[in-house]
């Protein structure tokens, strides 16, 4: 059990490339923290630095209050699950789990007891004498977990431990990992590129991009109050809609029409010193609704008319996709997200694609006009240059 | 049917080709074995199966210290050279496969160059050098040149095997608290075992078969190995040819190689790393 503190941690490679830039993060004892971000954002490097597999160029790492920059992985007393599990193929499941304990010269009987216990928890008792080659993907994943929990370390580090499993098993193991962590109460740092995994697993989520920490907070907070464009676009599926806007007093002119900012939001935007300028407006799909279904709230929002291109009915909701005339919002952080999604060259003709999540009761139809209501109070306004959320 | 005809034809073709290769390879060996069992009086009778079987040739060579001493030298020198080549080679190969150090490309190029060097061109300088520094006609005097030629080979074969082993296994061992040497010994070497055995066999055969160094760098039975010793065989009298003894000695030194290969070929199995990674 230990807390982990990163203070101004920076990783610079010999060629001068900065993989991790000035990361400050405090992980409390027993906490489950997720590092999430697109590939190449420095999350795995950060994890490797905590593990001691990668040197820290600048800054300080403290584990359990003790400076640990120069400690070997062994001295740090941490255990790690690798993306490809890294099981020792020439050893049985039992030997795999016992390896670290044997290295630590633990008593034979004690080792056996611990391995049996871990096997019990992970439902691996029947496979203890098999080699990894004879196990299924899910079983191998559990062995990798077992290798970590037998050690009873001060922290677990997990590097995309579920990304090699198929989708169904991944969801199942996700719950399993979460349950295990709660049960053992061990400080855990978990790296993933999958924002759904991040949102469902962690006590707190740390979003990284370009080597820098963007925002750290509980999943709901990241979702509701993203501090910048990157977090807003990265968290949430389907992702937030972004539109270019022009701020004029209390009104934002957008391709969806003029939006009147609610007073409180207007005050906050003005506090940021912006009264008249170009901005990026972000609206989550669920903050749209079929105007017929909103009733009294209609006055609090904005109603637009759009022709639905594609309608997907999921039973519980309906996703409506429509196009708005105008230029797409341009911002550096939006490009980063598009690059990660592999969507940078998927410029679909002209106009802006908008996704709206409507109630299942909506009578929307494809290729037909629909009145759509926008919940203006949930809208986010971002500065296109810094990416900062102006409504916070 | 055309298809079955062609496969039948293919079978016959391949069968014939295999037969030719096997016959070409086996006949000289069998002939040698046959010679070794022939009585000296029937050596030149030209028949493949000996008319008069005898074990005299074998008892003859084993009764002379010329051969028994040479056999001990051969076994000792080949085993020591193999052991050293595998130990030094695996450490060097690990460095080549895993580390980036200045001069790495140069080292690889130099070792390749050494392996390509014709041994005969080294013999005269070594002969003089060894006599000056006192290595002439000693075990180390042969082991050292064997190592110079087999180490590059060992490094090449082993580094290819090491490269196949996922990095993450070492990182896992490191996080599990193993020192670099522990992870090398307990994780890397067992996984590279097929490579280690392959290397061992190759080095052993090279040292065991060598004639050029053995004949040039030895002068007495102190370090003379079997291939060199055979050249010194004489008949029981100056009028008899030593062919029977030479054949018997050749059979005797072929046997250890066959045994080595039979033992180790079971260890040289691919796919030992299957299941290390991924699901």
Image (cartoon, helix red, strand yellow):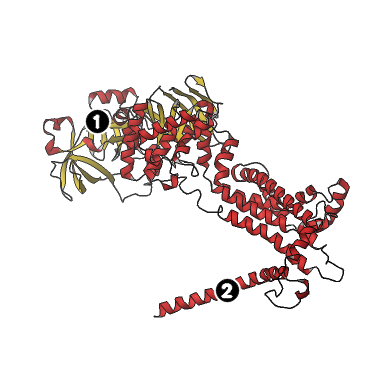
The N terminus of chain B appears in which quarter of the rendering?
A: bottom left
Within-10-Å neighbours for mark 2: few <14, some 14–19, many 20+: few
In what element is the residue under mark 2?
helix
- Inter-mark Cα distance, 1 to 2: 83 Å
Within-10-Å neighbours for mark 1: few <14, some 14–19, many 20+: some
In this view, A360 is above or below A76: below
Using residue B268 as the reference point, say whether residue A360 is left or right of it. left
In what element is the residue under mark 1?
helix
Q: Nearer the viewer, residue B126 or A25?
A: B126
**Quarter occupied by residue B202:** bottom right
Residue denoted by label 2: B19
Q: Position of residue A110 (x, y in %)?
A: 46, 28
Residue at 25%, 42% (x, y): give it. A355
In this view, A197 is above or below B258: above
Disc 1 vs disc 2: which is toward the camera? 2
Is residue B152 visible in this depiction of the protein? Answer: yes
Chain of the residue on which disc 2 is drawn: B
Rendered image: mark on residue A378: 1
Using residue A350 as the reference point, say whether residue B233 is left or right of it. right
Q: Position of residue B193 (x, y in %)?
A: 57, 48
Q: Nearer the viewer, residue B247 or B91?
A: B247
Residue at 40%, 29% (x, y): give it. A188
């Amino acid at each position: 059990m230990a807390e982990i503190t990163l203070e101004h941690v920076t990783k610079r490679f010999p060629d001068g490339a900065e993989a991790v830039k000035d990361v400050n993060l405090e992980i409390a004892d027993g906490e489950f923290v997720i590092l999430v971000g697109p590939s190449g954002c420095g999350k795995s490097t950060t994890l490797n630095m905590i593990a001691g597999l990668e040197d820290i160029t600048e800054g300080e790492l403290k584990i359990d209050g003790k400076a640990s920059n120069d400690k070997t992985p062994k001295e740090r007393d941490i255990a790690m699950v690798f993306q490809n599990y890294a099981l020792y193929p020439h050893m049985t499941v039992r030997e795999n789990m016992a390896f670290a304990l044997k290295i630590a010269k633990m008593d034979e009987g004690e080792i056996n007891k611990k391995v049996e216990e871990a096997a019990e928890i992970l439902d691996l008792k029947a496979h203890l004498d098999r080699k990894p080659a004879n196990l299924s993907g899910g079983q191998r994943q559990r062995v990798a977990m077992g290798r970590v929990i037998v050690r009873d370390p001060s922290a677990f580090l997990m590097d995309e431990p579920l990304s090699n499993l198929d989708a169904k098993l991944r969801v199942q193991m996700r719950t399993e990992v979460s349950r295990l962590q709660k049960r053992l109460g061990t400080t855990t740092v978990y790296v993933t590129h999958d924002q759904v995994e991040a949102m469902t697993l962690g006590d707190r989520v740390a979003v990284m991009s370009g080597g820098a920490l963007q925002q750290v907070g509980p999943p709901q907070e990241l979702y509701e109050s993203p501090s910048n464009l990157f977090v807003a676009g990265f968290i949430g599926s389907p992702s937030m809609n972004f539109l270019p806007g022009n701020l004029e007093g209390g009104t934002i002119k957008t391709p969806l029409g003029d939006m009147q900012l609610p007073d409180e939001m207007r005050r906050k935007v003005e506090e940021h010193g912006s009264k008249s300028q170009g901005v990026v407006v972000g609206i989550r799909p669920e903050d749209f609704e079929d105007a017929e279904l909103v009733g009294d709230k209609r006055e609090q929002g904005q109603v637009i008319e759009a022709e639905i291109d594609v309608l997907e009915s999921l039973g519980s909701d309906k996703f409506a996709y429509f196009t708005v005339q105008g230029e797409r919002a341009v911002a550096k952080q939006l490009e980063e997200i598009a690059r990660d999604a592999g969507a940078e060259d998927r410029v679909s003709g002209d106009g802006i694609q908008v996704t709206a999540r409507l109630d299942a009761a909506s009578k929307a139809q494809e290729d037909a006009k629909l009145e759509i209501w926008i919940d203006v109070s949930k809208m986010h306004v971002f500065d296109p240059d810094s990416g900062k959320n102006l409504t916070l | 049917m055309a298809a079955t005809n062609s496969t039948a034809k293919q079978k016959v073709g391949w069968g014939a080709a295999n037969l030719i290769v096997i016959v070409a390879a086996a006949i000289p060996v069998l002939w040698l074995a046959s010679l070794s069992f022939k009585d000296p009086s029937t050596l030149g009778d030209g028949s493949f199966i000996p008319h008069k079987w005898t074990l005299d040739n074998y008892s003859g060579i084993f009764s002379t210290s010329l051969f028994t001493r040479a056999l001990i030298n051969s076994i000792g020198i080949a085993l020591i050279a193999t052991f050293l080549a595998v130990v030094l080679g695996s450490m060097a190969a690990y460095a080549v496969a895993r580390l980036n150090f200045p001069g790495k490309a140069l080292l690889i190029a130099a070792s390749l160059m050494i392996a390509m060097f014709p041994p005969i061109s080294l013999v005269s300088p070594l002969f003089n050098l060894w006599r000056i520094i006192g290595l002439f006609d000693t075990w180390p005097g042969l082991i050292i040149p064997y190592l110079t030629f087999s180490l590059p080979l060992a490094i090449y074969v082993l580094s290819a095997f090491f490269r196949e082993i996922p990095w993450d296994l070492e990182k896992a061992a490191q996080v599990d608290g193993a020192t670099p040497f522990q992870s090398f010994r307990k994780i890397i070497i067992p996984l590279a075992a097929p490579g280690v055995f392959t290397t061992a066999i190759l080095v052993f055969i090279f040292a065991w078969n060598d004639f050029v160094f053995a004949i040039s760098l030895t002068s007495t039975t102190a370090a003379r190995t079997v291939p060199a010793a055979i050249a010194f065989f004489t008949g029981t009298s100056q009028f008899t040819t030593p062919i029977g003894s030479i054949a018997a000695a050749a059979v005797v030194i072929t046997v250890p190689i066959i045994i080595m290969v039979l033992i180790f070929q079971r260890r040289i199995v691919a796919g030992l790393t299957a299941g290390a990674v991924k699901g």
